[in-house]
Image (spheres, rainbow, N blue to C red):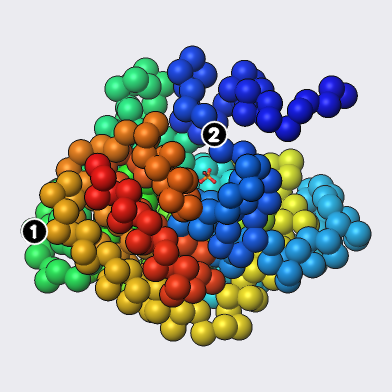
Amino acid sequence: MINHPHSSISELDKQYVWHPYSSLTDPIPSYEVTSADGVYLRLSDGRSLIDGMSSWWCAIHGYNHPALNAAAKGQIDLMSHVMFGGITHKPAVVLCEKLASISPPGLNKVFLSDSGSVSVEVAIKMACQYWISLGMSRKSRLLTIQSGYHGDTFAAMSVCDPLTGMHHIFKEVLTQQFFAPTPRTKFKEKWVEEDITDFKKILEAHSAEIAAVILEPIVQGAGGMHFYSPQYLIRVRELCDQYDVLLIADEIATGFGRTGELFACNWANIAPDIMCLGKALTGGYMTLAATLCSEKVSDGICKGEAGCFMHGPTFMGNPLACAVANTSIDLLMKQDWKANIDRIQDQFQMRLEPFAAMSTVAEVRCLGAIGVVELHKPVDMRTIQKQFVDTGIWVRPFGKLVYLMPPFIITNEQLGTLVDSMYRVLSNL
Ligand SMILES: *Cc1c(COP(=O)(O)O)cnc(C)c1O
């Protein structure tokens, strides 16, 4: 092994490593993190940053958590992994039972997989195989809403927002799906029934070809950070029943309390037929995802010609990830998590308000532990990333959206520092 000097990590990184949505010919340098603890990321140059991103919605309990560390270490000494075909184990069984018991009613069958995008692929495949089993294979397309984000694999990509997902580039390879407009009625606004008209028209005309509706309930994440009315979701559920179309709720970003409800579907008191979970599932420790479905869906699939669901990832039900997920969910459930999210929401409401007066800011909004500052113009990542780091915070905007979703353990004081630093950077734009 070549022992590279510490300082060359960023050079080697530039030479060999792809980062998410990054260029290798014109790379933006990445910051080397050597450790993380609580809400802090420690850089190789010794600086500590307050993390405003929870590593993309994941690290809800913060980093280096003693209970999660212990769960991982304990499981490693028993077994890190074992195949899931023909074999079962306690960490997975306990997790599936736990997920069934805390999720919206009726979602009692759990399919484990390795990442959010895969759990979306699994959900879409479940919906399609359900209709194939019932002899209605024409129902094979999806209806979704604009500004959505469901992952980077092909079926998931086909239901991402056509603009931000760059559908025109992948025109030849993506399945054409149905898109209804983004819900216009915002979270706290009075419902207007016309908001669902276009969605309903598509179902009216095409329900014979549509297997399922897929959407992010209440909060559209990476596709625009919109918060929409629970009434929209209630109407979607009713229309899916009316037109005999399955409903897939992608709760990969919203699950586990982030919006102020344990699952965003709870805002509307609805249960989808299929639900995707990921991101915060293991408290940000390991990659793990789950697709939950109702017995109607699992029965339909298993009573069909194939006789089983045609899917089975190699690392399905990884015991290490399941053990950490169990501990992470227990940690969340045994605290007054709702009061804590309300606290963060109150802090955001108070502390983000001054941003609205900046000429560069179009809108400020928050829901639960999510705070969003939408600008008039996209940020220049190359300069703004360094400015955030230089003020001691880790914030990763995209486009016009500068947003915060800190670990739930963040104190009011840390949150104050995070927002004040962000204010300083944005007021220099
Ligand atoms: C992040 C995300 C995904 C994709 O999950 P990965 O783990 O990145 O594959 C899918 N849907 C939503 C809503 C997400 O936020």
**Location of the N terminus (image quadrant):** top right
**Location of the C terminus (image quadrant):** top left
Amino acid type, residue under disc 1 in the picture? Glu
Inter-mark Cα distance, 1 to 2: 46 Å
Q: Nearer the viewer, residue 4 or 234?
A: 4
- The residue carrying mark 1 has its beta carbon less than 8 Å from ligand 1: no
Q: Disc 1 vs disc 2: which is toward the camera?
A: 2
Q: Nearer the viewer, residue 202 or 4?
A: 4
Dot 1 falls on a residue whose secondary structure is helix
Count of marks overlaid on the render? 2
- Where is mark 2, residue-wise? 30
Instruction: Decide: is 72 above or below 154.
Output: below
- Where is mark 1, residue-wise? 194
Instruction: Decide: is 197 above or below 385.
Output: below
Q: Earlier in the sequence, mark 1 or mark 2?
A: 2
**Visible in this render: residue 42?**
yes
Dot 2 falls on a residue whose secondary structure is loop
Assess whether mark 2 and mark 1 are in contact (beta carbons under 8 angstroms). no
Other residues around mark 2 within 10 Å, as few (<14) / some (14–19) / many (≥20): some
